[in-house]
Amino acid sequence: MKRTDFFKRTSRAVFLFAACTFFSRAVFAQEAAADDSSDLTAKAEVRIAADDSVAKAEGTQKAAVSESVHGLEESQKIAVSESVPQETAANESALPVSSPEPPAAVPAPEEKAEPAQTEEPVPPPKAILQPQWIKDGAVISTSPTKAAVILYAEAQNIADGTEATIRIIEKDGDGNDDEIETVTVQAADGKIEYAWTVIYTADDDDINSEEENTKKGFSLPEYAFTVECAGLKSEESGQLNVTGEGLVFSGVKNNTKDYVALKLENRDADSGLDTVIIAPNENLPGKFDGAVLKDGTIIKVSAKAPARVNFLINEDADGNISYVITDSISVAVDTGANIIKNLENSLLNGDKLLSGIYYNQHEEDAVLHSWWKTVAEEAGSPESWQEWYNSDVQKSLRQRAVG
């Protein structure tokens, strides 16, 4: 209820109360006047009417007062409910804004000063550097066989006595390198070293291997090495290319796809045989007068014991056969023997055969048919040469021929 309505109702109640009082006084005045008259009946009627008026006035007065009190209570409730938030807000806005005070700092426990620690120095990194081939104090990249060389690498920050593994490989053109030798040495004075004698190893996997084999009877190897030490592995060394200097091919090399029968320079005393069988791509050292092929072709060289002529038997893609005398000494021996034969044939009417290739010697009237006949008697037909090659007799003969 609004405050204005409250005042209106209160004023009306006061007014009614005043009106009732006035009316009551008027009634008493009438009674007094009626007492002066003698009419008792009129006096009674006036009295009754006055009592009724007073009762009605009192009832109206009570109702007005009750309504006013109830309205006052409701107005007070509404006023209080409306004023509380406003007053609270006003009070809050009137209060000074202040930041919350931080909690009192708790003093940290006193730490005991620890003695300063001395950092251990970081050791310098270890390394295996510059693997090289050394000869006479100089780095080399070529060497003949049987030469003494040093395999060297720098051992940086590696303790003396630490074991090192050196692996020597023969490099192949197809990437399938062959391991030649593995040795264990010790690092000393910041170095890893190993003394090695260059050996010959057949290298048949390079691009020019076939050409070397057909010309010289051997293909020259190329070596490299690595070093492993203290959990590290070096890079691969540079290549050591082996030269043909001092390397002499010995005997006969069969560069064909078939088995070949070789004629010994001197008949074997133990077996009494004159024929040795060799396999395709096999090299057999020894002293031989020539070779017999399965189609009747015979290769003849000229030599007198104790000299020998080393030669290759080659076959091209079309099956054509050729031969090559491999070294200068063998060439000189063969050439000298042919000169002597020519002189004997010219001066003495001799029939000595010179070096060369003779075809169809399986025919009976051929000049070297005797060679073909001897091979057939000792080794059988060409189809059985492989079986004869694997016999114990031939194995022993090949071993003696080498000597």
Image (spheres, rainbow, N blue to C red):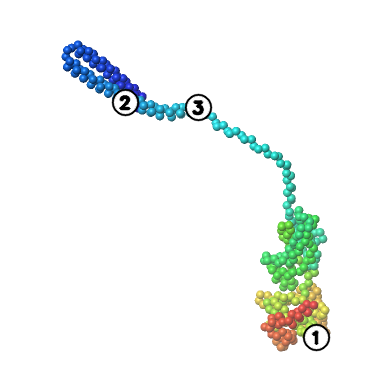
Q: Residues within 10 Å of mark 3 (few under 14, many from 20)?
A: few
Q: In the picture shown, does residue 169 fall above or below 286?
A: above
Q: Nearer the viewer, mark 2 or mark 1?
A: 2
Please, what secondary structure does the residue beneath circle 1 have?
loop
Three-letter code, disc 2: Glu
Across and down, in percent, residue 243 comes to: 77, 66
What distance separates the C-alpha of mark 3 from that of mark 2? 41 Å
Please, what secondary structure does the residue beneath circle 2 have?
helix
In the rendered image, which quarter contains the C terminus?
bottom right
Residue positioned 43% across, 29% down in the render: 85
Name the residue beneath numbered marker 1: 350
Residue positioned 43% across, 28% down in the render: 84
Three-letter code, disc 3: Leu
Across and down, in percent, residue 141 comes to: 76, 62
Across and down, in percent, residue 106 comes to: 62, 35
What distance separates the C-alpha of mark 2 from that of mark 1? 175 Å
**Front in this rendered view, residue 151 or 366:** 151
Q: Is residue 381 left or right of residue 140?
A: left
Q: Is residue 247 left or right of residue 49?
A: right
Asked if one can make out residue 70 in the rendered structure from this viewpoint, the answer is: yes
Three-letter code, disc 1: Gly
In the rendered image, which quarter contains the N terminus?
top left
Residue 330, labelled with which disc?
Answer: none
Q: Residues within 10 Å of mark 2 (few under 14, many from 20)?
A: some
Q: Earlier in the sequence, mark 3 or mark 2?
A: 2
Name the residue beneath numbered marker 3: 95
